[in-house]
Image (tube, rainbow, N blue to C red):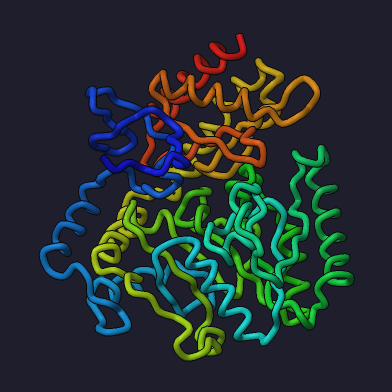
Amino acid sequence: MAQLSPILKQATPVVATHGEGIYLYDDAGTRHLDFTAGIGVTSTGHCHPKVVEAAQAQVGRLIHGQYTTVMHQPLQELIQELTSALPTGLNSLFFSNSGSEAAEAALRLARQATGRPNIVVFQGGFHGRTVAAASMTTSGTKFRAGFSPLMSGVVVSPFPNAPHYGWSEEQATDFALSELNYVLQTQSNPADTAAFLVEPVLGEGGYIPGTARFFEGLRERAARHGILLIIDEVQTGFGRTGRFWGQEHFGVTPDVMMFAKGIASGFPISGIAASSELMAKAWPGSQGGTYGANAVACAAAVATLGVIRDEQLVENSQRRGEQLRSGLREVAAQYPQITDVRGLGLMVGNEFRDENGTPDGATASAVQQEAARRGLLLLTCGAWGEVVRFIPALVVTEDQISDAVGIWREAVAAVLG
């Protein structure tokens, strides 16, 4: 009998049969609070009725209308829905299937538009697993080890990761901007630098929000040197951080924006957005793909965006995120091993360190597994797996947050005593 690759490891023991809202149900009929949301994908919860209805209706009309061969109505509707949501000036779209594809499309556009070879990325960023995307990823060696040589032209500069350095946000920001100046002076001449690529909040890198002054510094240096600013909103977009886009927390607008995950409630669709002027600088034939902008995925995305708007899920993300962080900080206050509770909106991480201040992935994993046994599904992240992350669907309620915090409290107590 065929089987999955042994390298693919499940983060929880659940065999899911169906989902509804914030809950997953297993093959024994047990209900689990899902605070993974398919790694931040099921933004409107599992099987939201409006998303299900839209997808089912579209399957009966047109499943695949390859969008460089024919145009289809769901794509036209999706472009219309996104028009009012896109950051100012980003009015041209290219669609693909995954975050990795979006990263590679942004990279290709930046190099073609500027005629420059280099990309500056920031320490701890995650942009995907394909060769170019992995070459730009520094959140962990597991994403890029064992298949060298990687793509050339990638230079890494520090992110203002205050918890890692043990500094204040001001100190970490000063350091990150100073080191970026040093990178541009010693490793990538501005005339050779096509773009800066950065996440508003480090995702796989440990749920570390950026700072307004850091992003202001990126924007200023980009403008001064003719460098493009690419913001990766794959995990932070569509209300995840309590704003529609994560970049809104920092008052900056990119030249190119990547998106995926929460746009279609679980259907695979991703893309990049740029100005029409910039997008026109892509070389003919450089953008395409068989499955990009699939008709069913587009229909699901239109429905998802409607639900996010009509049910005020961005606002709910902000309110429930505040409640979640407050509850988790009450738990953390009882245990010195939980050294930080941080995040924006419903993108929240709990960092574990041992008595020597060393990142403690073993304890983080033990608590995550104990929570799963008690009915709360969570994931870990961070370079050492030392951060347990909470990323519930944006439809999560006050009572469900309270239930999750209660289970977390019990799981932490069971592991740490």
In the depicted view, which residue is nearer to us: 184 or 329? 184
Is residue 32 toward the left or the right of residue 195 in the image?
left
The percent coordinates of residue 275 (x first, y second) are 53, 81
Image quarter hosting the C terminus: top right
The percent coordinates of residue 169 (x first, y second) are 78, 46
Name the residue rendered at 57%, 59% in the picture: 127
Can you say whether 290 is above or below 26 in the image? below
Is residue 208 toward the left or the right of residue 375 in the image?
right
Name the residue rendered at 50%, 58% in the picture: 234
Of all residues shown, which one is farthest toward the front? 1
Q: How many numbered circles does the render carry? A: 0
In the depicted view, which residue is nearer to us: 205 or 220? 205
Name the residue rendered at 73%, 22% in the picture: 354
Can you say whether 108 is above or below 395 in the image? below
Of all residues shown, which one is farthest toward the top? 417
Name the residue rendered at 85%, 54% in the picture: 174
The percent coordinates of residue 109 (x first, y second) are 56, 80
Is residue 169 toward the left or the right of residue 291 in the image?
right
The percent coordinates of residue 374 (x first, y second) are 41, 18
Is residue 80 toward the left or the right of residue 252 in the image?
left
